Image (cartoon, rainbow, N blue to C red):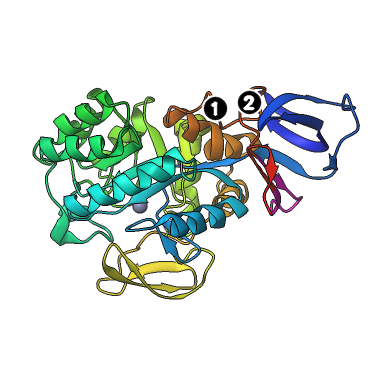
Amino acid sequence: MIAGASMVTPDGVLDEGWLEVQDGRIAGLGSGPPPRTPDRDLTGQWLVPGFVDMHSHGGGGATVMGADAGQVQTFGATHRRRGTTTLMASLVSGPVDQLERDVRALAELAADGLIAGVHLEGPWISAARKGAHDENVLTAPDPADVRRLLDAGGGAVRMVTLAPELEHGLDAVRTVAAAGAVAAVGHTDAPYEVVTEAVQAGATVATHLFNAMTPLHHRSPGPIMALLEDERVTLELILDGAHLHPAIAAHVRASAGAERVALVTDAMEATDVGDGEYVLGGLAVRVQDGVARLVEGGSIAGSTLTMDSAFRFAVRHAGFSMVDAVRATSATPARTLGIGDRVGALKEGLAADAVVLDADLQVSAVLARGEWVA
Ligand SMILES: [Zn+2]
């Protein structure tokens, strides 16, 4: 039993909220005097749902590419300390054989509950919008390869980012969606019309909207307009202050609504480690002042962001209310991944995943499946 916090639920903020945990789940919640003596008093603090990060490559010095169980543990623990209780493992582009090995290894760890699933970001993306992906391994989505990687995961591949303009691109969207995974449009140079078709074919996510896609132009609206205007599409935003101007994030929230925004980290291994030299998907990366860039060419190479920091940025600089920021860091990504019936809200019956934030919105404690994280 915890009590006293301002608790953000799907229906709004409960002042002096209480929440009861039983067997790792939320057994009840309300406001006012708790039904029994609380085990922990959270007066003066916020209680929000555990964060759901659907796009993350690493952290704490670990990367999910070629990772063993220990590295994935480090990755998970690093983000969990910052409030992320549901974490997808994102693989960057690589040769299909290597990706198949990684998917198999990560699928086992997903079955153990270490990660929520696997996100394939490439290799079926545009060389023209490759960002920090190795151009030599980029390819069109051969239908047999798409099947092969989905099958290797046995259901653990929950999201695939691809460029729909590539040969077989729209077929790949259909195959991914039919397999019950999320087809995401990203790293794309596609015209507006092709992205519209991809959404009709079942694509439901914009992978880091604005980043690694053709910019908006009034005679050629491109992917951004097509993704923004269809309410079936969840819009990933990287709010680290480097990837997007805060006014852009505020505009997306106001025009599309917070229920369509999913804040993601796109974090790489330097997250919570510090500046220095790293490798991402085989390419050399330099992290300076927390911003990761390719040594060659200077492309932004993921981020060193954590979800708590994205949450604060949304509230302080992008006009998100607490309720909006909670939606964009929990309910929306959970719903998008198809796991909204298990995680993503302070609601009876869901996993007891929650973050205690102090008055400055810094993490002061994390509850994961009903256990306090050290
Ligand atoms: Zn990424």
Indicate the quadrant where residue 129 lies. bottom left
Amino acid residing under circle 2: Pro
Note whether 202 is above or below 70 in the view shown: above
> How many C-alpha atoms fall within 10 Å of the one at disc 2: few (<14), some, or many (≥20)?
some
Residue 333 vs residue 151: left or right? Answer: right
**Residue 58 drawn above or below residue 230:** below
Determine whether the residue tagged by mark 1 lies in a helix, strand or loop: loop
Instruction: Return the residue nearer the eye: 356 or 224.
Output: 356
Q: Is residue 139 above or below residue 270?
A: above
Is 366 magenta? The answer is: no
CA distance separating discs 2 and 1: 14 Å
Label 2 sits on residue: 10
Crowd tier of the residue under label 1, counting other residues whose Cα lies within 10 Å: few below 14, some 14–19, many 20 or above: some
The quarter of the rendered structure image containing the C terminus is bottom right
Q: Position of residue 112 (x, y in %)?
A: 47, 41
Asked if residue 358 lies in the magenta stretch, the reply is: yes
Residue 257, horizontal then vertical, whole percent: 49, 31
Extreme residue toward the bottom, this view: 276
Picture residue at 88% right of the left edge, 24% below the top: 35
Query: Can residue 1 be seen at all in this image of the molecule?
Result: yes
Q: Position of residue 324 (x, y in %)?
A: 59, 35
Helix, strand, or loop for circle 2? loop
Q: To which quarter of the image does residue 128 belong?
A: bottom left
106 relative to 247 in the view: left or right: left
Q: Residue at 16% x, 31% y: name it.
A: 170
> Along the line of sight, which residue is nearer the eye, 34 or 10?
34
Q: Which residues are magenta?
A: 354-365
The mark found on residue 342 in the picture is 1
Residue 181 is left or right of residue 240, and the answer is: left
Residue 113: image x %, image y %? 49, 40
**Count of picture labels:** 2
Amino acid marked by disc 1: Arg
